[in-house]
Image (cartoon, rainbow, N blue to C red):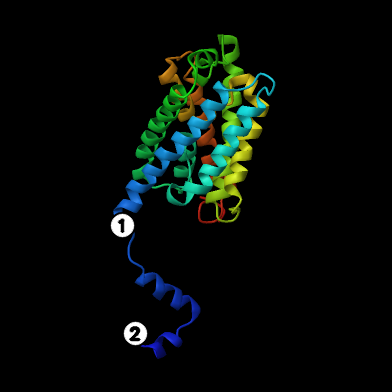
Amino acid sequence: MTDTELGNMDFKEKQEHEYEKMPAPHWYEVYVQPCLAELLGTSLFVFVGCLSVIENSSSTGSLQPALAHGLALGLTIAVLGGISGGHFNPAVSLGAFIIGGLNIILVVPYWICQLCGGMIGAGLAKALTLDYRFQDAGGASFNAVKSDSQVARALGAEIIMTLFLVLAVCMGAINKKTSTPLAPFCIGFTVTADILAGGNISGACMNPARAFGPAVVANYWAYHWIYWVGPMIGGLLVGGIIRLLLGDPKIRLFLK
């Protein structure tokens, strides 16, 4: 195409022409690199989260773990989110997939990488802490639920807190109408708020990978299912709400 012909094109046609000239992304960037980013990001997030619990000073209560989890997640999303979307959480990946923000081919690989990252992060935290501190903190596993009478409250808390978190991710980073450059820090603040609010009820996990890694390392599985069922239900609910009610016309299924 000559310069004269290009100059006579309108703006939309020029954009389409430029898009056609762009090379297709390499398969490594489409399928492998996002999974590596999820593995690394989840490892770092879980490492900082577990370390903050194990080394938590009694004078800070839940403030230290809340700030550590929230800041670590926000910064990790800001650094790696451009590669993988910055999920680092199977429940977030589920919600993102439902609203069209994640290719179905990547759902299971993301989950596998997130769970492996959870084990790596928890293992590193154990390796760098004193044995008595690790044992006193239960290896940073979720042990807030001690009896069957606590299950309903803990499960409800995990569903609602995860709903809040996944909503922040999907509306702040995926839904075009509400997306914002501040999404990483909004998501991190959501985690901080959830831990401060519900930490004493369920431990405020909101993330099966964060629960799974320490459970494997510390071999603690009591009521572990709560930290899978609750977050995944929360992710499903957010996907349904955005698809049916809150999503932009590209995402919303009805009343476009």
Q: Look at label 2 and name its amino acid.
A: Met
Coordinates of residue 193 in the picture (x, y in percent): 66, 33
Which mark, residue 76? none
Q: Look at label 1 and name its amino acid.
A: His
Taking depth in this image into account, of 132 and 16 the one nearest to the observer is 132
- Give the mark toward the camera: 1 or 2: 1
Q: Quadrant of the C terminus?
A: bottom right
* SS class, disc 2: loop
Q: Quadrant of the N terminus?
A: bottom left
Coordinates of residue 151 in the picture (x, y in percent): 57, 15
Crowding at label 1, few (<14), some or many (≥20) Cα neighbours within 10 Å? Answer: few
Taking depth in this image into account, of 172 and 219 the one nearest to the observer is 219
Coordinates of residue 187 in the picture (x, y in percent): 59, 42
**Direction from residue 18 to residue 50 in the image, left or right:** right
Label 1 to label 2: alpha-carbon separation: 26 Å
Instruction: Residue at 33% x, 46% y: name it.
Output: 32
* SS class, disc 1: loop
Can residue 141 be seen?
no
Callouts 1 and 2 close, C-beta under 8 Å: no
Instruction: Residue at 31% x, 51% y: name it.
Output: 28
Residue 155 versus residue 45 in the image, above or below: above
Residue 78 versus residue 42 in the image, above or below: below
Looking at the image, the residue that sits furthest to the right is: 59
Residue 27 versus residue 234 in the image, above or below: below
For disc 2, the marked residue is 1
Crowding at label 2, few (<14), some or many (≥20) Cα neighbours within 10 Å? Answer: few
Q: Earlier in the sequence, mark 1 or mark 2?
A: 2
Coordinates of residue 147 in the picture (x, y in percent): 56, 9
Looking at the image, the residue that sits furthest to the bottom is: 4
For disc 1, the marked residue is 26
Instruction: Residue at 52% x, 26% y: name it.
Output: 50
